[in-house]
Structure formats: structure tokens, C-alpha cells
Image (cartoon, coloured by chain):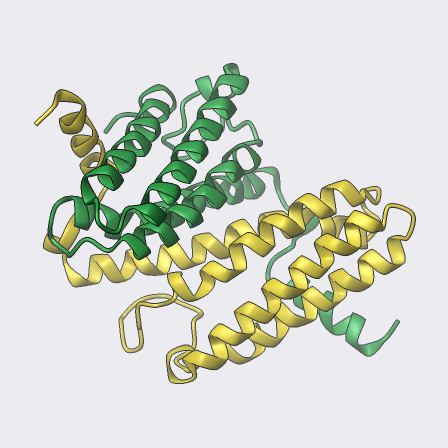
Chain colours: A green, B yellow
Amino acid sequence: MSVRKLAVISFVLAIGFAGPVSAADERTQDAVETRQGLLKVVRSYFGPIVGMARKQIPFDAAVIEKNAAAVADLLPMIPDVFRMDTRGAEIETGALDGIWEDWDDFAAKAALSAEKAEALEAAAADGADDPGAVMKAFGALGASCKGCHDEYRQQD
Amino acid sequence: MSVRKLAVISFVLAIGFAGPVSAADERTQDAVETRQGLLKVVRSYFGPIVGMARKQIPFDAAVIEKNAAAVADLLPMIPDVFRMDTRGAEIETGALDGIWEDWDDFAAKAALSAEKAEALEAAAADGADDPGAVMKAFGALGASCKGCHDEYRQQD
């Protein structure tokens, strides 16, 4: 085995690929943190657009286009990171059981939101002079996100 | 204001867009969790490929192709989620100060890793019959990740 290969293997060990020896509840906790992590990244790209919608920061179509593209890349990952069924696990999570009871609907809602993010990206690409149209597309994305949260996320 | 617009606004409030009224240290904590979240998602896509490299699960070029594509989408987001300079903040983080001292190099290393992920995606698309070539491309991606961690991430 080459030195480089050894180095890479020790690297992947170091960053925590515990593999099948890790306890089941550790893997569950990991899965929850991963899916929450994905949504945190989505939220970080939403943030500036929300600020623009509230007129707290100036409208910037280029930023919206870039951020919507990132969100469009991220949302299709939702079914991947939610694949582990954590129903019944003793963990703190806002994920409702319906996710795994109605998996196809959950995945379809994520896909629909990804389409709305693509539509926002397209609207922003054309919309430097028409903030109203861009914000309408943002509203449609927000409504789509909300549709999924209403169904599958614990309400505060 | 339409009912739908109100609903969307209350939704974005509910999922935590506290906006500029939130305390600075809350925003710092948020930024740290977001960047850690992004890397957790990257890791989740690495996991099965590491399992294949260790021969714990069977080689599957289609899975590698899909996961490498996701990683190639995620890695360019690294500069976005690390933009907030958290040097000196009293937070638990493995992020070293060099990230913001040598920002251009940090961003370039993230971009290089994204290229290696694209190369892995391409190798996997061609490589159903040649696990060796695919795993070589995976090694190159791992080495690139390691190069960035060695420089910019606290060693355990």
C-alpha cells in the first residue's frame, strides 16, 4: 500500500468514518445532524433574499440568482439525507413520522421545491429590473417550502 | 398584503430568520453550525464510497457517480458558508484562523476539491468495469480534502 493511500485512509478515519462498528444511536444522531445541517445551509442561502424581501438590504438580482441556484442544488439532496428512518428513536428532532409513512409524497414535495428554486434562479437571471417578478418567484418557493414543513415538520 | 404573502412571511419567521435583531453571538453560532452542517452532508455522501474502498460493501459505480455529483455541488459552497470570520469568537470550532488569513488559498483549495469530485463523477460514469480507476479518482479527491484539512482544520 502506498504512503499516499495510507495517508488518505488515516484521513478518512480521522474525520470520523467510524463505519459499521459505531453504535446504532451514534449513527442515528449523525443522520439527524446531517439532515439538519443540510437545511441550515439552505437557510443560509435564503437569508439574504429574506432581507431583500423585507427591504432591510438592497435588492440584488445577481445574489438571488446565485443563492437560488445553490438552493436548487441542495433541495434534491433532502431524500438522501432523510433516508434513515428515525421513527421511535430517542432523539431531539422536528421530523414527523409522516416523512417515512408517506415517503413518496415527501420526496415529491422536495422535488417540487427544487423546481421552484430553479424558477427563482431563472426569474432572477431575467429580473434585474423587475424586483416584483423575482419576489413573486421567491414567494412561490417559500410557499412550497412551507407546504412541506406544514406536513412533515413539528410546529414550534 | 395577501394572505399567502403573510403566510410565507410568518413561515420564514418561524424557521428562524431572526434578522439583524439577533445577537451577534447567536449569528456566530449559526454560522458555525451551518458550515459544519455543509461538511456533514459532504461526509454523508463520502460514507458509502469509503465503505466500498474498504470492501465492506460491494462496489457500485452508479452510487459513486451520484454521490460524487452531490459532493461536486456542495464543495463550491464552502467559501459561502465560511465567509463569516469567526476568529476570536468564543465558540467551539475546528476552523483555524488561516482560513481568513489566507482566504484566496482556502477558496482555491475548495475549488480544487470540487474539480476532483467532478473527476470522480466522470471516472465512475465510465468505470463500472474498472473499480481500480474509480478508486484512484476517489483517492485523489480524498487527498485534496486532506490537503485543505491539514492546513485549515484543527487536528484531533
Q: Count numbered badges in the picture.
A: 0
Measured along the vertical axis of the image, is residue A6 above or below residue B10? below
Residue situated in front as seen by the camera: B7 or B149: B7
In the figure, is residue B123 to the left or right of B87?
right
**For the point 16% across and 51% down, which residue is it?**
B19
Query: In the shown orientation, is residue A11 left or right of residue A74?
Result: right
Q: Give the residue drawn at x 51%, y 28%.
A: A86
Residue at 59%, 56% (x, y): give it.
Answer: B72
Q: Residue furthest left?
A: B1
Position of residue B75 measured from the top left corner of the image (x, y, whole percent): 53, 60
Q: Is residue A99 above or below residue A10?
A: above
Residue at the spot 48% in from the left edge and 76% down from the top edge: B106
With B145 as the anchor, is A141 left or right in this view? left
Residue B77 locus on image (x, y percent) = 46, 59
Residue A52 visible at all:
yes
Q: Quadrant of the C terminus of chain A?
A: top left
Above or below for A101 versus B107 = above
- Residue furthest out toward the bottom: B101
Q: Which image quarter holds the N terminus of chain A?
A: bottom right
Image quadrant assignment for residue A66: bottom left
Q: Quadrant of residue B138?
A: bottom right
**Residue A84 x, y percent position in the rendering:** 57, 32
